[in-house]
C-alpha cells in the first residue's frame, strides 16, 4: 500500500515516497494530541500493524458497496498554501491485502479540489485520484468525491472533533 502521489504526502508532512509504517509516526502524534488514546504499533504475522484508536469514523461508497470504519484519528496540515490531511482508521499494514485486517487510510491535499488516496477493505480498494473534491475543505467532517478508473466514489468522514494539526 504505497502513496503514489507525492503531493498527498506533503499533506502528511512527509514529502517522500512512503508506506503505512512511516505514516504511523504522524498518526501516533495525531492520536496523542487528539484526546488520550494512543495509536499502537504491533507485530502481526511478522509485519508492523498500525492499530488506530480515537473518535474518527468514515464511510466509503465505491462500486455499489459501502464500507464503514471507526476508531480512528485525523491529522490536518498545510503545504504550499494548500490544506489537507490524513485519516487512519482500524488496522493498517504495508503488506499485500493488508494481511486480511480491516482498516482504512485517507490522504487529501488541496483547497477544495485536490488529490486523494484511499486504501480500504483489506487492501482490495485502492483509489488514487488527482481530481478529487473535498466538501467543505478538509476539516473535522466532510466528503471527498471523485472517480477512480472511471468509477465514482465518495468518502464521508467525521473526526469527532477538530483534527490534530502538524
Image (spheres, rainbow, N blue to C red):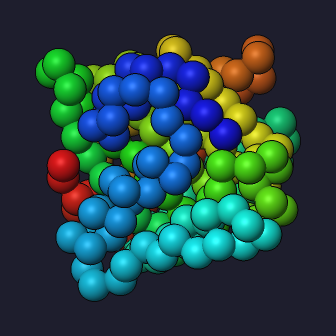
Image coordinates of residue 21 in percent, x first then y, are 52, 53
Quarter of the figure with residue 119: top right
* Residue plotted at (28% across, 63% down): 29
Left or right: where does residue 52 sit relative to residue 160?
A: right
Q: Nearer the viewer, residue 103 or 59?
A: 103
* Residue 34 can be seen, yes or no: yes
For residue 113, above or below residue 32: above
Q: Position of residue 68 (x, y in %)?
A: 67, 62
Q: Residue at x 76, y 17 (%)?
A: 149
Compared with 157, 73 (above or below) is below
Left/right of residue 157 with respect to residue 59 in the rendered view: left
Count of numbered labels shown in the rendering:
0
Q: Residue at x 15, y 21 (%)?
A: 81
x then y, percent, for residue 58 = 55, 58
- Provide residue 161's location: percent of width, then percent of height: 27, 68
At x 39%, y 20%, the residue is 7
Instruction: Name which quarter of the figure residue 82 lies in.
Output: top left
Could you say which is closer to the camera, residue 4 or residue 21? 21
Amino acid at each position: 500500500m504505497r502513496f503514489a502521489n507525492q503531493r498527498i504526502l506533503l499533506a502528511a508532512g512527509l514529502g517522500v515516497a512512503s508506506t503505512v509504517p512511516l505514516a504511523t509516526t504522524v498518526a501516533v502524534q495525531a492520536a496523542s494530541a487528539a484526546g488520550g488514546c494512543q495509536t499502537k504499533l504491533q507485530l502481526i504475522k511478522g509485519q508492523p500493524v498500525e492499530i488506530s484508536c480515537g473518535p474518527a469514523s468514515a464511510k466509503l461508497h465505491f462500486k455499489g458497496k459501502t464500507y464503514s470504519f471507526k476508531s480512528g484519528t485525523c491529522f490536518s496540515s498545510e503545504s504550499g498554501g494548500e490544506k489537507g490531511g490524513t485519516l487512519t482508521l482500524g488496522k493498517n499494514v504495508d503488506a499485500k491485502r493488508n494481511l486480511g485486517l480491516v482498516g482504512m487510510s485517507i490522504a487529501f491535499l488541496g483547497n477544495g479540489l485536490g488529490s486523494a488516496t484511499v486504501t480500504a477493505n483489506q487492501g482490495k480498494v485502492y483509489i488514487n485520484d488527482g481530481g478529487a473534491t473535498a466538501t467543505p475543505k478538509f476539516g473535522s467532517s466532510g466528503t471527498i468525491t471523485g472517480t477512480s478508473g472511471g468509477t465514482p466514489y465518495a468518502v464521508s468522514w467525521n473526526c469527532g472533533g477538530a483534527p490534530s494539526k502538524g
